[in-house]
Image (tube, rainbow, N blue to C red):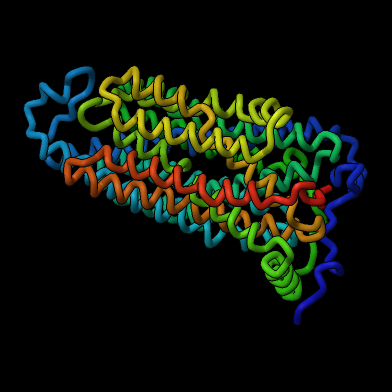
Amino acid sequence: MGIDMESVDTTTGSEDKPLLEAEKGNQRFPWVSLAIFLVLQILIAVPEGMLQTLSVQFARSAFASERNVTLPVGVNACATSPHESSELADVQAAVALFATYQSCLKDFIPVLTALPLIALADFTGRRPVLLLICLGGLVVTTGFLIVSFFEISVYYTLVGSAVFGVCGGFILLNSISMLYVTDIVPKEHRGVALAMIYAFENVVIYLGPLVINVLLEALSSYTICFLIPACSALLACLWMLPPDLVQESVKKQPLDLGVASGIGHGICRLFTDTFSVRLVVLLACDSVVNLLVEGFDNTMSLYGLGEPFCWSPTLLGVFSVVHGVPHSLAAPLIVWVIELFLSDYWLIYISILSSIAQFLLTAVATSNEVLIYGASLVGIFAGVSQPVFVSLITRLVDTKFHGALFSMYSLVYGASTTFSLILQSAAYSFTVSAGLNVVIFYAMASLSALVLVPTICMHILEPKDGFDDKSP
């Protein structure tokens, strides 16, 4: 039986007082709770950041060993390799195919499981869901550690990836982190707290590859390198065990099928409102941007490891840092400064043009300096449009339907992010086999240009007086 959205009690505490204090009489300062949670987030994010590059290199090494191919590493190593280019291309295609399978399990399954688990967190509390994420991370990292130590088929690691996906993966971590911080921090400080979550999460994910690749090059042991994220995942589980450390932030509620019906009703209302067409267009544009941006790091790892660049593990880590850290730290500042003088839509234009420049420069680059530093510099604004699109769509929806809006947005974001990794890995596998690996970057530049057309139309058709801002 359905229920009225307005009758659903979705309150987690007083808006002026965090629930940990308001409901439990807890005297802990919100910033102390936030600091404790940030430690947990770092421990969970470390394996995610390290496995992004380490799993690809491990698979590449395993497939090369199976084919008795010695992998070229370093400047001009590809040109002087004793193996035929077709042999190296075969290894690269196998790695790309493995990355596709891994993405299907680790990134696509969470699209299906994250939303139910987020909804379940309103009834079971946040802690069980957070612990589930920790256990998923422990399983996938332990899987790689076992496979590396016993030197068995790399495909056994897909079992751990599947478990990680069922446990919600990174999509669930991102959503539940935002929910938990919203619970524990008063609204006047909530923006700063959420920005800290964003910054810490991304910096750890981008710094992880550099650290692990430096260690890999120094130690030449995948087993030792996989031991580090496995230990981090274990520490995350241990961090969650004491109930008074990462405290519960919501009151548990009885399960009620009417709640699910009410959320479905709210989502339907989103697409029958006055600005539903504009909402659909903006969500579609944001999805295309996600499709291009989210899988780019993975595609660049495959591209840089192959001919003619043959990146070393350290160089792979350097790219991750140069490409990701400056953008992660500077994005909030860039948005704040430009919004002082220009419309939000101009931020989207700048971001898309920056993406196009990055894709084109990547396609024509013939040296590591241009590929790593030049392309990253011109693409520093790429991805800035993602939070701007979110800001625009929240202005179209009444406050009481923001829960339904972000449930829908989580689904769209998760699906586009997952398909980005899967489609780009599959497309790169096809193009590298055909000897046309740079074609994928020209295709990405063309898709970015197409996003400009509906965005410009939405800008032109926006009411002169703007929209009534219905967000709180």
In the rendered image of this protein, does residue 61 appear above or below residue 217? below
Query: How far across and down, in percent of the image, does residue 44 sit?
Result: 56, 38
Q: Nearer the viewer, residue 115 or 333?
A: 333
Residue 93 image-quadrant placement:
top left
Residue 402 image-quadrant placement:
bottom right
Is residue 318 toward the left or the right of residue 461 in the image?
Answer: left
Q: Nearer the viewer, residue 402 or 55?
A: 402
Q: Is residue 386 visible?
A: yes
In the rendered image of this protein, does residue 105 appear above or below residue 436? below
Q: Is residue 168 visible?
A: no
Residue visible at 38% across and 51% down? 422
Query: How far across and down, in percent of the image, does residue 436 sit?
Result: 21, 41
Query: How far across and down, in percent of the image, does residue 274 sit?
Result: 73, 64
Residue 318 image-quadrant placement:
top left
Is residue 135 toward the left or the right of residue 141 in the image?
Answer: right
Residue visible at 37% across and 52% down? 423
Query: How far across and down, in percent of the image, does residue 298 sit?
Result: 38, 39
In the rendered image of this protein, does residue 78 appear above or below residue 45? above
Q: Quadrant of the N terminus?
A: bottom right
